[in-house]
Image: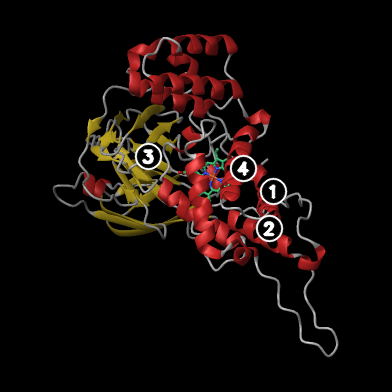
Amino acid sequence: MNTRAVWVVALLAACGGSSKKPEPEPAPVVTPEVATTPSAAPGKPAPPAPKSLFDRLGGLPAITLVVEEFVTRSTTDERIKERFFNTDATNLKKLLVEFVCLATGGPCTYTGRSMEDSHAGMDLVDEEFTALVEDLVAGLDKYKVPEKEKGEILGALGPLKPTMVVSADKLHPIDDAKLAAVTKLAGTVKDKAAADLLAKAVIAGKRGQQSYAEQLFTRAEMITGPKTVASVAATFRTGAPARIAGTPKALPDAGAQPKVVGSSDSDSPAAKPLAASLKGTLTIDGKAPSGFGVIMMWPANGKYAKRTPKQRVIEQRGKEFAPHVMAVPVGSTVAFPNYDAIYHNVFSLSNPKSFDLGMYKSGESRDVKVDKPGIVRVGCNLHASMAAYLIVVDAPAYVATEPDGSFSFASLAPGKYKVQAWNERSGEPLDTTVEIKAGANQTTLDLKAGGQAISNDKFNNTREVKK
Ligand code: HEM
């Protein structure tokens, strides 16, 4: 393998792309004498090993300078700067330095996500990729990186394109006549930043970047207020779930929430413990599950008191929802506070409750009342990797499972029960019955694998980039 091929492979490995599908091999850019492994002529010492691209570029100080310049250019480039409005630029620079360092043969570890994961849901198109590469070229030129090394870097970026740029059939262009009305409205909007965002929303809408267009529109709306742009809101929002709008409320940070929450024993403790208890394990295809689940139990005779609705919280922190799995009685209200320095857009497309909370900043929250039983999958329209599961229960007894699949009900009345068990990695919930005798009881509930992660955006478009 020649030198360039070695670090192209390293780069692809860092991107998480190498193991999935072979990438097209770009034209070689390294001269044969560099690419050839040096070997000793008989009786002579071996020639020195060729320097890595990392060393030829000038090591970490030089890479850091180029990345600084590259990120500054990309985040101010009119063609793509809005892509970075919700990104921590300092962290992005750090990750890019690690990425380029590792890829060029330097002594670094890349601590970021794969290229697929970090660009999923962005609906990136060719011209945006080109704009970014041009910003990189300008950064390399500023620091007078020689043509040969520049060629090696650019030659390695080409194969990454399919891991982040979507194909045309994944795009959903918005009707031209509707976008013309937005352009007309933009011409009347006094605030330049808002008018600019509307103009960019039109470009994104024409390309078919539905979620990105709505995001740009929402940012314009946040500047102008909803009334000014109300006449064109449907152009960007048709197809998304009903919005829960209104002014977000401030919700003080009560500290990081646990990963999993929900137990009728602790939500509604019995005044006097009942005569039976149940300990059990939820398995998937006979093995310990990798995700969390919920067990619900109804007395088979249909006689039971309804649980009191609760007020609960699912926070957004560190680009994750917490709790990740939560069981609540039907009729409960869940607040979704954002405790990150960036925006999130919480939504659900699920039948029991579909909603779109829009974007709001750190310390703010919107409420969702869940009035039908079922599984509500929750996602973030800005961060494809975020997922939470809200299990709305009408059962009098329910409990969320521990990481190893174990669960426990401390206080049950003896008798026959209908049981439903669900896990985030299972397909349909399991419906079964158990007979609970006075005293301690034990059971195992085995589910079939098949749960799906939340990969679609709020328009129900796939967020998987790879074809
Ligand atoms: C070869 C091309 C590219 C490379 C090597 C690259 C590399 C990276 C890296 C290493 C990260 C950090 C991953 C992480 O957060 O864990 C990242 C994030 C990001 N990239 Fe790229 N990228 C490329 C193309 C693009 C393009 C074309 C755009 C848009 C015009 C873009 C926009 C972003 C944004 C907005 C983030 C931050 C995501 C977030 O905050 O969650 N990237 N990229």
Q: Which mark is residue 139?
A: none
Answer yes or no: is residue 437 visible.
Answer: yes
Of circles 3 and 4, the one toward us is: 4
Q: The N terminus appears in which quarter of the rendering?
A: bottom right
Quarter of the view holding residue 226: top left
- Mark 2: few, some, or many residues within 10 Å (few <14, many ≥20)? many
For the residue labelled by badge 4, is the local secondary structure a helix, a strand or a loop?
A: helix
* Disc nearer the start of the sequence (3/2): 2
The x, y position of residue 373, in whole percent, is 37, 32
Q: Which mark is residue 8?
A: 2
Residue furthest toward the left?
271
* Disc nearer the start of the sequence (3/4): 4
Using the image as rendered, state which of residue 229 and residue 84 is in the foreground.
84
Q: The C terminus appears in which quarter of the rendering?
A: top right
Q: Is residue 224 above or below residue 155?
A: above
Residue that mark 3 sits on: 391
Report the amino acid beneath label 1.
Answer: Pro
Residue under the image location 22 percent in, 54 percent down? 275
